[in-house]
Amino acid sequence: MKSLFLIHNEADFKNACLETFNHQYQTVNVYQDFVNYLKIRPQDVLEIQQIPFLPIELFKKHQILSQNSKADHYFQSSGTTQMLNRSRHWIAEFALYEESIYHSFSRFIGPPEEYIYLGLLPNYSENKHSSLIYMVDFLMRQSKKSENGYFLYNHQDLLSLLQKLKNSGKKVILFGVSFALLDFLDYCKSVQQRLDFPELIVIETGGMKGRKQEMTKDELLVILKNEMGTQNIYSEYSMTELLSQAYSLGDNLYQCPAWMRVMIRNVEDPFSYVADGKTGAINIIDLANRYSCSFIATQDLGKIQNGFFQVLGRIDHSDIRGCSLLVS
């Protein structure tokens, strides 16, 4: 459904949402059962706010996939070996995910072909079921730069390469889960080296749970700015159950591409929404999820302010999840 990348205004978005809702009600059995359980009639859904949002936990227990589609591959949420129920998002069309990656990255960062990508992540062959690693691998394939690579287990080579690239005039992006970025900084301190790379772009993808002392996102961003020697500390927000990404270009303030939207529901009443500036639970519309479900009720807390959204943590008692568990 490439028309979703041509959304230009609120009317386009609303029409796409309502069409997607009706399509998925007809074709995704789990979503149809959920809507029926709520006793909601599709013909009565005329506004975006009336669309039912599928609890994200159902991706752990069911195959959320259009009955008209076939999927041979899935993305799986991060987790430990003790976590038996991990979310699986079955992918019917990788081209749609790749186009979503490309357009969103271009919108917020720049043309993917222009950058060198360095990853403090496992490489794709080590974790083929990670949507994050698939994204970074796709970006590397677009740029075809010889310096592209993964360095999760090799801090020495990463430091040497960054020092070599620092004055090269080339555009460099370092992707990393939060704890891995901090581990790299610890290594730099241990060898008494500072990066001081003002042109470097660092994109942190979250993930500290169970790996290091917890800190707020704001505290993390300050540390990365000071120790990396760059003001370009960005953040990416997505999850296994999505095929789109939101980006923050600073200050923990995220923006969505035109085919994605965050809405903040009342924690006590999942069918109502809070005012801007108020904290609630995050609902996500991701129209790139054409063949699964585009309307997902997450377990993240957040708020919307001046067109941006913030992620403030997890709802109590929700499962530990996140990119920090990729390397467990």
Image (cartoon, helix red, strand yellow):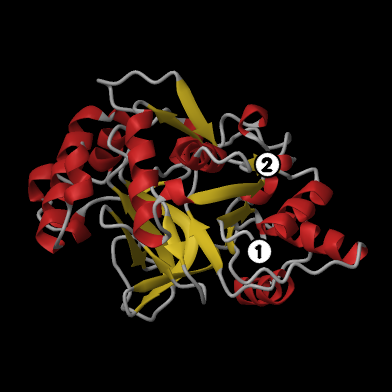
* Left-right relation of 180 to 311: right
Label 2 packing within 10 angstroms: few (<14), some (14-19), many (20+): many
Q: Which residue occupies 47% across, 67% down?
A: 248
**Looking at the image, can residue 97 be seen?**
yes
Q: Nearer the viewer, residue 214 or 143?
A: 143
- What residue lies at 56% left-to-right and 70% top-to-bottom? 232
Q: Which mark is residue 150?
A: 2
Q: Nearer the viewer, residue 28 or 241?
A: 241
Q: Position of residue 307 (x, y in %)?
A: 31, 74
Say which element carries label 2.
strand
Q: Which mark is residue 276?
A: none
Quick one: quadrant of the C terminus? top right
Instruction: Using a 10 Å C-alpha cutoff, classify the residue at mark 1 as few (fewer than 14 neighbours), some (14 to 19) or many (20 or more).
Output: few
Relative vertical location of residue 216 with respect to residue 87 in this rendering, above or below:
below
Q: Nearer the viewer, mark 2 or mark 1?
A: 1
Going by the numbered disc 1, the residue's amino acid type is: Asn
